[in-house]
Amino acid sequence: MKYEPIIGLEIHIQLNTKRKMFCGCSTDIWKKPANSVVCPVCLGLPGALPVPNLEAIKKVQLFGLALGCKLNTNSNFDRKHYFYPDLPKGFQISQYKKPFCYEGVLELKEGNVEIERIHLEEDTGKSIHDAKTDETLLDFNKSGMPLMELVTKPQIKSPEHAHEVALKIAELAKFLNVSNVNMERGNLRIEPSISLRPLGQEDLPNYKVELKNINSFRFMRSALKYEIKRQTKELNEGNKIPQQTRGYKESTKTTFIQRVKETDSDYRYFPEPDIPPFEFSKEYIEEINKLVPVLPSKLKEELHDKHKISTEKIDMLAKLSRVEFVINLIKAGLSAKDAVNESLGLSKGQYKEVFENLELFVQKIKDSKKHQMDDDSEILQIVKKVIKENTASVNDYKAGNINALNFLIGQVMKKSGGKANPAKAREILVNNL
Ligand SMILES: [Zn+2]
């Protein structure tokens, strides 16, 4: 029997607000001593009252509008109950029936994917298991960090497609400056759910396997690939696949069962009594709408007018849908010219891998530029010398021997100590022969 995968994504993105979600603690917690960025509110102490962070709410609404979502004019926070040591209150403040944003769409060449909802919640603390002493330690610095959760409809058709969706969401979040999307710091976590149905069947399968807390695109892809294999085998053997939550192990590239999946009723949601419901006026929503950049056209304009990039190159970027990527590179410190050229030079595979190491990628380019001789007059001096010293090869080239040209380029590179830009060296050499 042939099956097709049905994939949906839940993407958690840590917002880059100054303060945590419901208290005055800073969000600058990276590498801070454990439990040093906490207060009674984010520690969940009895009697402490949460105060919502408007900056976080606005970021979620901006993100939603950029994805064509509708905003709920009436909204509220809810309590989601579950027991876990890193959740000191015994519940998480989240949103249930009335998320801030709903019904959007992510437009992709590989197939559009509808966004079901985007809501806001607080993050939990972190448990660290010490294998030596067999103790579990708790760090609450992350407790109360603002988390945006985006849920897509189950319309994704393959692990590759899922990668495209997650990448576009991440790029947009960075571009709109709602998050730093630093993958290494766990700013983005993906929870894909996947099930299989026989090819040709219209109905959704009657089960769903959820994969928890994946923090890289590559891991997501390989976890999904493994699940397709595993579920195909189960179904072919006539087994029923239970509703469950699984983890992913990179060392074996396999998934493993964590628990039987909870249903909504297990969470005993109810409206958060300590935070009054929200009512957003038309004027308020219009103000946020004004902040949504008219994506493609405005960006193209910016690249053309401000950064003097040719229309031809901009069209190529747009065709590859790498305009936001280029702007992110410029923001990360590349010159517009380098950002455009590097973006156009990346293969599809390379492009999909770069985002997770954007800072490293930018640094590498900067380093190579520092060392590369780009100055035409400097290269010209060397070219002239090489032509003078290698008359035999020059004559060979003129007689049609292309290998002679490669030899001459090699001489230029050698004389420049390997620093000349090879493309430029070639161009200047040919012009002078
Ligand atoms: Zn706090």
Image (cartoon, rainbow, N blue to C red):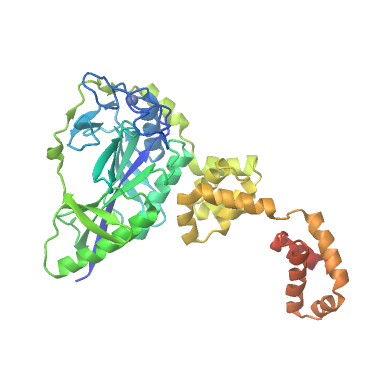
**Quadrant hosting residue 65:** top left
Residue in the picture at 53% in, 42% down: 297
Which sits in the foreground, 23 or 210? 23
Work out which quarter of the rendered image holds the N terminus and state it. Answer: bottom left
**Quadrant hosting residue 52:** top left
Which sits in the foreground, 424 or 407? 407
Give the residue at the far front of this rendering.
Answer: 133
Q: Position of residue 156 (x, y in %)?
A: 31, 55
**Quadrant hosting residue 186:** top left
Residue in the picture at 87% in, 75% down: 391
The quarter of the rendering in which ligand 1 is drawn is top left
Q: Is residue 87 visible?
A: yes
Image position of 155 (left or right of 318): left
Image position of 105 (left or right of 295): left
Work out which quarter of the rendered image holds the C terminus and state it. Answer: bottom right
Q: Position of residue 70 (x, y in %)?
A: 33, 35
Q: Position of residue 42 (x, y in %)?
A: 30, 27
Residue in the picture at 32% in, 48% down: 190
Seen in the picture, residue 325 relative to 176 is either above or below; the reply is: below
Image position of 79 (left or right of 341): left
Which sits in the foreground, 97 or 130? 130
Seen in the picture, residue 200 relative to 297 is either above or below; the reply is: below
Q: Is residue 200 visible?
A: no
Q: Position of residue 21 (x, y in %)?
A: 34, 28
> How many numbered discs sit on the rendered protein?
0
